[in-house]
Amino acid sequence: MTHHIHHCQVYYEDTDLSGMVYHANYLKFFERAREHFLGPDELVRLLQEEGIGFVVYKAALSYREGARLGDKLEIRSRLELVSAFRLIFHQNAHRIDNDRPMVEGRIELVCVNQEQKLVPLPSGVVDSVTALQESS
Amino acid sequence: MTHHIHHCQVYYEDTDLSGMVYHANYLKFFERAREHFLGPDELVRLLQEEGIGFVVYKAALSYREGARLGDKLEIRSRLELVSAFRLIFHQNAHRIDNDRPMVEGRIELVCVNQEQKLVPLPSGVVDSVTALQESS
Amino acid sequence: MTHHIHHCQVYYEDTDLSGMVYHANYLKFFERAREHFLGPDELVRLLQEEGIGFVVYKAALSYREGARLGDKLEIRSRLELVSAFRLIFHQNAHRIDNDRPMVEGRIELVCVNQEQKLVPLPSGVVDSVTALQESS
Amino acid sequence: MTHHIHHCQVYYEDTDLSGMVYHANYLKFFERAREHFLGPDELVRLLQEEGIGFVVYKAALSYREGARLGDKLEIRSRLELVSAFRLIFHQNAHRIDNDRPMVEGRIELVCVNQEQKLVPLPSGVVDSVTALQESS
């Protein structure tokens, strides 16, 4: 199974006084990539029509090398379906076309309804992930 | 009329690679001060029970001196009631006990309901501001 | 003189509990657009080789309509050279291909050296802006 | 060994459209707490005089319950000295006086010099942690 690629650039807002990207901001980069992976329009539809949202349940990050202002990053994401209720995104930040990850992430997600109760993952998401996994 | 004082400290997250506070973050400091000025519990009650929220309509900032990691700031806020629909917060960031402002702000606010329609300012806010102005 | 266009998308990180983009974040969108306007590589070179950085001196924002999750925005930027020391960026956030601005901004910038002293705008920036203005 | 307690309040800026704190922001809360734990003035001195900074090497977070606007949180931090080069902060976000954690974190840190090379932890930090551990 190939990775989903999302490009993002490091701006002033992303850096801190060390001159490098503030550690929490990689979670933002990873979430942007997940939104593109799942489809922003589908995420909005799920929220508005079905009242279902994704929430982060666990996050683990390993920092190997800091990105700097102007760096052009690619976030490589791979999705693992753990159960009918739980997804894991394996997401790494790379310099473009460089296979050594700068930051490695493992983000576990579940879905909740408007009362913040756990609900099964939307069937559309499960189907498309299963199709991707079988074709790989 | 005296100022409302809110203390905030400059953390890593607030800085950028210049070593100073990222310019947008003073808007965050000013909003924290406004939330304390108006009362966080009252803001939550207005949102949940009356469906009324404050929104920023205009913001103007002048930057004179940059704050740095570890700086202890005080946000001095003064509220001006412009009409039944509009408030202006005059808010400056200072070093503690230093009367020369580092950043000066002027933030205009209105209230909206859940359909994002303009509504009059809550009477509780108007009354307390009027009382403050008369006593000064 | 035509506008410089920078596209940005609204992600979860940009929103607040109102469901719309947090007011301070438009300053981030505008800065991203300025970095692309001036060229990220040139900004990094100026910082590293000449010790010169741009700093925001004044910012004024008018909010007309809030952007929401998934919205695809374009930041339209026009640069005005005020003096050898001062630039103004006129920057508006629009929905793509919609001429009514959602948020209007006016951002004044100066350049400083590593001691935070005012220095003239880099000649490369002045020349390219002047060329743009004469050709329009 | 008792916990270090840092209080922080949830503001508009911290929330996203779910109405709860955006997941990445707990890393900010945890870092604020670490800065107070280690002492902001000492952190600034280490950076300026010795060119030594702390960097996050690994972070792991478990999210159990989301905090909301106006919530008053306490970040409980406990420090574990792993080696002469590595520290682990065990940090949890709680409602005030509530022992059930909302978010649990485990943040591993190392120190680097200005060339981003690994250096031993500052002796002052090691000594004070050792003293704390022996006294507990």
Image: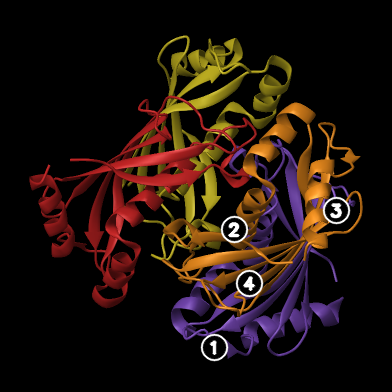
Chain colours: A purple, B red, C yellow, D orange
Horizontal relation, residue D110 to residue C26: left or right: right
User: The numbered mark 1 sits on a residue in which chain?
Assistant: A
* Residue contact at pointers 1 and 2, CB within 8 angstroms: no
Say what amino acid the circle numbered 2 marks.
Phe
Q: Quadrant of the N terminus of chain A?
A: bottom right
> Which residue lies at the image location 61% right of the left edge and 37% below the top edge?
B16
Of residues C36 and D90, the one drawn nearer to the viewer in this rendering: D90
Q: Nearer the viewer, residue D78 or C11?
A: D78
Q: Residue under label 3, please give it.
A: A101
Is residue B14 at all visible to an observer of this figure? yes
Residue at which label 2 appears: D29
At 60% across and 14% down in the image, what residue appears?
A: C124
The quarter of the rendered structure image containing the C terminus of chain A is bottom right
Q: Is residue C20 above or below residue C100?
A: below
Q: Amino acid at mark 3?
A: Pro
Q: Which residue is mark 4?
A: D103
Label 1 Cα crowd, 10 Å radius (few <14 / some 14-19 / many 20+): few
Could you tell me which secondary element the residue under label 3 belongs to?
Answer: loop
Distance (Cα) linking label 4 and label 3 = 27 Å
Q: Which kind of residue does numbered mark 1 sit on?
A: Lys
